[in-house]
Image: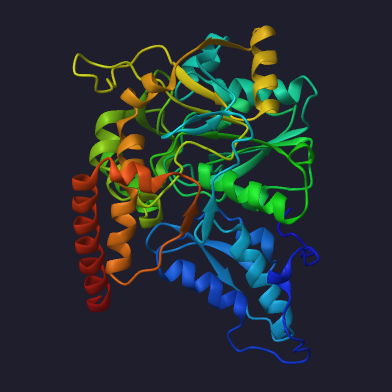
C-alpha cells in the first residue's frame, strides 16, 4: 500500500477551514509543513507521511538519510492542501508525540507504560543465534503468521540487488523469516509498505515508525483492536547510509562485489560482517563497528528522541546485556538474551501464548535492572530537556512532546541538562555555519 487514498472526514475543529475552493498554491500547505520538519532536522525518515498523501515519496539523499519529497499538484486547492497538512502534522513524529495513556498499566519513568516485563529468547536455537539479541521478534513474527493469527509481517531486510541497502519487506507464511533477522543499522522507511486497515497484519518497526502507525490509526478512527499488531525494539538512532558504504569500502577490496552485509546476529551481539561474491567474509566487532564507525553519524532527530524503546508498540524488545563489575554492559559474544516489554493487553496475551506453545522462553524481570544495562536510553531521557533547549537557542524548531515526565526527569539532573543544552546549541550553530559555507 503506497498511500492512504482518502483523508478522514474532519473529527474536530482543527480540520475546519474557510472555503477557498478553486484557488491553488505554488508552494502549498502540505509542502510547507513537510519542509518545516525536514529543514529543522526533525524528520525520522519513517515514511509515515507517504501514507498521508500520494504526492509524497521517500528518497535517499546525499547525506545518506531517507527524506520525503512532495510533488507539486496544480489541481490542489488551498482547502485540500490544508487538510493534508493537518493530517500530516497529526501523524508525523517529527512534529508531535504524545505518550500513550497509562490506562492502569505499570509505569517506569525511562521505559514508559507496560503490562508486563520479561527477559527471554527464541526457543529455536538457530533463530536465537541468528537474531540480534535472542531472536524474539523473528520467532514471534514467524509464529504469528504460520499459526494463522496474522496473515503478514512488514519488516526490513537487505536489498536483494544491493545488500548494502535496506528495504521494507512484507513476509507471509511461504517466506523465510530469517531474512529479516539481525539489526539493520541503516535508513529504511517501513511505513511505506504498511497497511493501516489490515488488522490481520504485523508491523515490525523502529519506535518512530510504530508511533506514526499508532497516530495514523487514531486519525483514521480505527480502534487498537482493529489495527495491525505493532512490534518494536530499543533503538539508539538511525545512522546514515554513508556510514555503511564507508565501512564496507574499508573492509572489502571491491564494495560492488559484496553479496551480503550483516550488522549483528550469528551470536550476541555478533559481528558486522561483509561477505563477497567469492565467499570471503570480513568481520568487525559490534563494539568497534557501531562505536567507532556507523554509530558516529546519527541523524539529528534521533538525538532528540523521547521514546527509544517503542512506547506505542504492543511488544518491544531490547538487549538485556550482561554487565561488568562496574555495571556497564559487556559486548562479549554470548547466547542472546532480550528484555521484552508487553506494552498492551493484546501484546501480553500473545507473548504469554507464544511462551506456552514453546515459541519463546521468558522469565519476569524488574525494569530497574534494565535501566542499569541500558545507560544510553537513560542518559538520553533524563537530559532531553537540555538538548531540546539547546536546539531552540540555536534557532531550530523542535518536536512537541507531551506526557513523558521530562521536566521531572530534568529537575533531577540540572547540571547534566545545562551541559546538554550548551553542547547541543554549540554543535547546532557550528553545523548551521558549516552548511552555509558548503
Q: How many marks?
A: 0
* Residue 309 position (above or below residue 356): below
Closer to the camera in the image, 279 or 204: 204
Is residue 54 at all visible to an observer of this figure?
A: yes
In the rendering, at what x and y percent does residue 309 appear? Answer: 47, 36
Q: Quadrant of residue 40?
A: bottom left
Q: Seen in the image, is 298 located left or right of residue 341?
A: left
Residue visible at 51% across and 30% down in the picture: 107
Residue visible at 77% across and 91% down in the picture: 22
Closer to the camera in the image, 204 or 413: 413
Residue visible at 22% across and 71% down in the picture: 434
Closer to the camera in the image, 63 or 338: 338
Q: Quadrant of residue 335?
A: top left
Closer to the camera in the image, 112 or 78: 112
In the rendering, at what x and y percent does residue 282 appear? Answer: 31, 30
Is residue 294 at all visible to an observer of this figure?
A: no
In the rendering, at what x and y percent does residue 78 appear? Answer: 69, 85
Amino acid at each position: 500500500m503506497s498511500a492512504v487514498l482518502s483523508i478522514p472526514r474532519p473529527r474536530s475543529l482543527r480540520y475546519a477551514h474557510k472555503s477557498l475552493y478553486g484557488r491553488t498554491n505554488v508552494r502549498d500547505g502540505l509542502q510547507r509543513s513537510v519542509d518545516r520538519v525536514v529543514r529543522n532536522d526533525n524528520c525520522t525518515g519513517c515514511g509515515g507521511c507517504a501514507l498521508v498523501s500520494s504526492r509524497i515519496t521517500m528518497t535517499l539523499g546525499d547525506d545518506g538519510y531517507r527524506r520525503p519529497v512532495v510533488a507539486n499538484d496544480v489541481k490542489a486547492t488551498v482547502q485540500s492542501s490544508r487538510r493534508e497538512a493537518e493530517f500530516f502534522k497529526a501523524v508525523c513524529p517529527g512534529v508531535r508525540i504524545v505518550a500513550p495513556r497509562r490506562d492502569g498499566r505499570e509505569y517506569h519513568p525511562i521505559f514508559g507504560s507496560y503490562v508486563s516485563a520479561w527477559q527471554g529468547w527464541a526457543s529455536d536455537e538457530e533463530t536465537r543465534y541468528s537474531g540480534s539479541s535472542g531472536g524474539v521478534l523473528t520467532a514471534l513474527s514467524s509464529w504469528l503468521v504460520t499459526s494463522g493469527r496474522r496473515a503478514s509481517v512488514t519488516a526490513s531486510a537487505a536489498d536483494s540487488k544491493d545488500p548494502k541497502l535496506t528495504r521494507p519487506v512484507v513476509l507471509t507464511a511461504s517466506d523465510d523469516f530469517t531474512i529479516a533477522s539481525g539489526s539493520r543499522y541503516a535508513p529504511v522507511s517501513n511505513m511505506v509498505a504498511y497497511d493501516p486497515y489490515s488488522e490481520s497484519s504485523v508491523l515490525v518497526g523502529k519506535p518512530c515508525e510504530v508511533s506514526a502507525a499508532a497516530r495514523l490509526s487514531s486519525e483514521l478512527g480505527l480502534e487498537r483492536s482493529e489495527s495491525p499488531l505493532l512490534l518494536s525494539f530499543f533503538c539508539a538512532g538511525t545512522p546514515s547510509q554513508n556510514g555503511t558504504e564507508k565501512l564496507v569500502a574499508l573492509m572489502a577490496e571491491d564494495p560492488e562485489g559484496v553479496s551480503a552485509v550483516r550488522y549483528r546476529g550469528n551470536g550476541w551481539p555478533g559481528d558486522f560482517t561483509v561477505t563477497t561474491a567469492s565467499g570471503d567474509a570480513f568481520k568487525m566487532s559490534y563494539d568497534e563497528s557501531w562505536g567507532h564507525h556507523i554509530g558516529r553519524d546519527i541523524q539529528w532527530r534521533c538525538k532528540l528522541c523521547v521514546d527509544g524503546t517503542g512506547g506505542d508498540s504492543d511488544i518491544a524488545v531490547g538487549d538485556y546485556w550482561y554487565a561488568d563489575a562496574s555495571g556497564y554492559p559487556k559486548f562479549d559474544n554470548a547466547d542472546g538474551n532480550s528484555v521484552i516489554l508487553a506494552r498492551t493487553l493484546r501484546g501480553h496475551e500473545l507473548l504469554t501464548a507464544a511462551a506456552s506453545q514453546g515459541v519463546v522462553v521468558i522469565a519476569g524481570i524488574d525494569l530497574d535492572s534494565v535501566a542499569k544495562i541500558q545507560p544510553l536510553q537513560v542518559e538520553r531521557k533524563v537530559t532531553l530537556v537540555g538538548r531540546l533547549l539547546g536546539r531552540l537557542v540555536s534557532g531550530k524548531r523542535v518536536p512537541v512532546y507531551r506526557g513523558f515526565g521530562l521536566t521531572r526527569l530534568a529537575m533531577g539532573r540540572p547540571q547534566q541538562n545545562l551541559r546538554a543544552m550548551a553542547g547541543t546549541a554549540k554543535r547546532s550553530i557550528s553545523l548551521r555555519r558549516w552548511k552555509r559555507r558548503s
